[in-house]
Amino acid sequence: MTDCGCHVEPTTESVEERKAITIALALNFTMFVVGVTAGLIANSSGLLADALDMLSDSLAYIIALVAIGRSGRFKSNAATLSGGILAVLGIGVLIDTVRRALGGEAPLGWIMVASGTASLIVNATVLRMLAKFREGDVHLRASWIFTRADVIANVGVIIAAVLVMITRSNIPDTVIGLAIGAYVVKEALEILREARAEGART
């Protein structure tokens, strides 16, 4: 019988992993909705980029939930899918940021600060919760990498927001939007490399 990973009895470890990922999924999807709403109201590329990053995390967590308790090959494929989704979203962020930059209108800095701070609190909490899994299976390492990227992005959004309020310019928002997009693509490539290495071992 081939190891398809289709049926594996749950272990204490897998139950713990599932609980952590489920909480992370709920928090990230909530902040995705908040971030998109705030980004549209504030006309902020940085917030929208950050929100799309949260959506990519949510997708990664869904995939991770499905992968828990499955075979190594299944986990490698799940991580590959996560990386692919993240790469596509990262490129989309870059394109949207350039489009908004051409409009020239400065976003509402105070909304950026409020939303960025809320996202930072959520992601820092999730990162701490997932820290125990960062040396685990590839799909769990991917989830931890996603969240680590989010924390960095949140700090960047807050800094950009302060600069927007000081300069009344959209340049800081454009810069952070491009930076988040580029970082998202970099993290996607890292996940794809890890997934490829994991696949070669299984």
Image: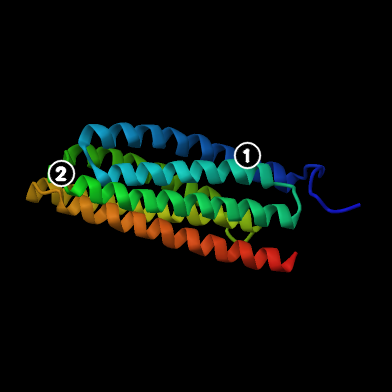
**Mark 2 crowdedness (10 Å alpha carbons): few <14, some 14-19, many ≥20:** few
**With 3 as the anchor, is 96 left or right in this view?**
left
Classify mark 1: helix, strand or loop. helix
Residue depicted at 55% across the width and 46% down the height: 60
Q: Amino acid at mark 2?
A: Gly
Nearer to me, 174 or 54: 174
Residue displayed at 18% across by 53% down: 172
- Looking at this view, is 136 or 32 the one in front? 32
Question: Which color scheme did the rendering employ for the protein?
Answer: rainbow
Considering only vertical position in the picture, is 156 above or below 186? Answer: above
* Total count of labels: 2
Q: CA distance from mark 2 to mark 1?
A: 43 Å
Q: Position of residue 59 (x, y in %)?
A: 53, 42
Tell me if residue 147 can be seen: no
Front position in the image: 101 or 63: 101
Q: Residue at x 51, y 64 (%)?
A: 190
Report x, y in % for residue 46: 27, 47
Q: On the rendered structure, is 194 left or right of 3?
A: left
Q: Residue 19 falls in which quadrant of the image?
A: top right
Which amino acid, by three-letter code, is at mark 1?
A: Lys
Q: Which mark is residue 114?
A: none
Nearer the viewer's eye, disc 2 or disc 1? 2
Q: Is residue 186 left or right of residue 4?
A: left
Query: Does residue 26 appear in the picture of this structure?
Result: yes
Residue at 10 percent of width and 49 percent of height:
169
**Which quarter of the figure is the C terminus placed in?**
bottom right
Residue, far right: 1
Q: Which residue is mark 2?
A: 103
Q: Which mark is residue 19?
A: 1
Residue 181: % across, % down: 35, 54
